[in-house]
Amino acid sequence: MSGHYEVVDWYQLPRYYDIAFASRNRREVDFLQALYERYALQGGAILEPACGSGRLMEGLLRRGHEVHGFDLGEAMVEYARKRLDARNMGGTLWVGDMSAFRGRKRYAMAHCLVSSFKYLLTEKAALSHLQCVADSLRKGGVYVLGFHLSDYDDQRDDSEEHGGRRGQAAVECRIDSGPPNRKTRLESIRARLRVNLPTRTLASETTWQFRTYDEKQFLKLLAKVPSLAHVATHNFSYRADEEIEFGEEDLDSVVILRKH
Ligand SMILES: C[S@@+](CC[C@H](N)C(=O)[O-])C[C@H]1O[C@@H](n2cnc3c(N)ncnc32)[C@H](O)[C@@H]1O
């Protein structure tokens, strides 16, 4: 993608974010549903910290679940609320920070995919997040946490592309990541959105930093929350019946943390 990009936070454009990621919805909702059944979470409500546009909340509501979600971005929450209201679906939404939150009830499942957890830039914030999740889960409940692990020996840039079309809007999205810094525990990310509309083209560029984790760093953090046990790992193929070893074998990790 080339051309002129405006510095507009892409989360201020929830509709276009939503279109760019929509092709993943079915696979991710199927995966969450399969885990819900696998861990026998019958009837319990589901929480999504950093719920964004509500794309997964809608999918899980359609499967008959009670769903709660919150996000720091007001535009995202407003979009998610309108989408659920428009379909008369219920669902509970609020603006909140995933480093310090209280659930509205005890949940059977919480989930946070696509590395959103890495927005928490300090150990303190990440630990507080995991503690809040643990406090919000009922006994036996699971947290499904998806994020890309770092290999500090690999200093190459990385990128991924997403996209989709809805109505008159065609959206292309490219996300570039810089190499992980072993010392600062940060990596630089840039998201570019290009939206082709019949009469104009919109372009936005957003940059931010993610906290980085290798396997040991994540397990060290998790050990500080004894009520959450790491019971399984999957990868971004989102197959509930396929587990992988956590670590360098596959950096795209979805860890299942069970409250006991
Ligand atoms: C990549 S989006 C993921 C949204 C959604 N979970 C999904 O799968 O589409 C990341 C989201 O994290 C939110 N976010 C970033 N920092 C946050 C924080 N500290 N607390 C809550 N939400 C946060 C952003 O506003 C954004 O909506």
Image (tube, helix red, strand yellow):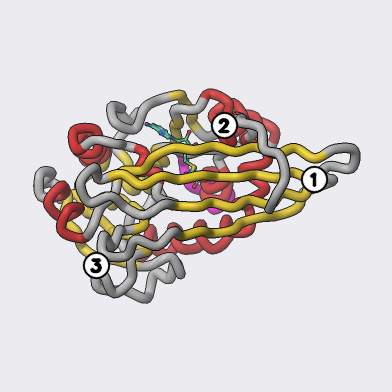
Q: Nearer the viewer, mark 2 or mark 3?
A: 2
Of residues 164 and 44, which is closer to you in this image? 164
Q: Which element type, helix, strand or loop, lies under badge 2? A: loop
Q: Residue at x 43, y 65 (%)?
A: 236
Q: Position of residue 38 (x, y in %)?
A: 34, 65
Identify the residue position indicated by label 3 in the image. 247
Q: Residue furthest right?
A: 199
Q: Marks 2/3: CA distance?
A: 32 Å
Where residue 251 sits: x, y (%)?
Answer: 33, 65
Type of amino acid under label 1: Asn
Seen at 37% across and 64% down, the residue is 252
The residue at the point 53 percent across, 48 percent down is 56
Ligand 1 resides in the quarter of the picture at top left
Specify few, some or many for label 2: CA neighbours under 10 Å numbering under 14, 14-19, or 20 or more: some
Q: Which residues are magenta?
A: 61-67
Is residue 65 located in the magenta-colored stretch of the structure? yes
Q: Disc 2, disc 3: CB below 8 Å?
A: no
Q: Is mark 3 within 8 Å of ligand 1?
A: no
Q: Amino acid at mark 3?
A: Gly
Label whose residue precedes the other's in the sequence (1 or 3): 1
- Element carrying mark 1: strand
Residue 242 occupies which quadrant of the picture?
Answer: bottom left
For residue 196, the mark is 1
Q: Secondary structure at mark 3?
A: loop
Residue at label 2?
A: 9
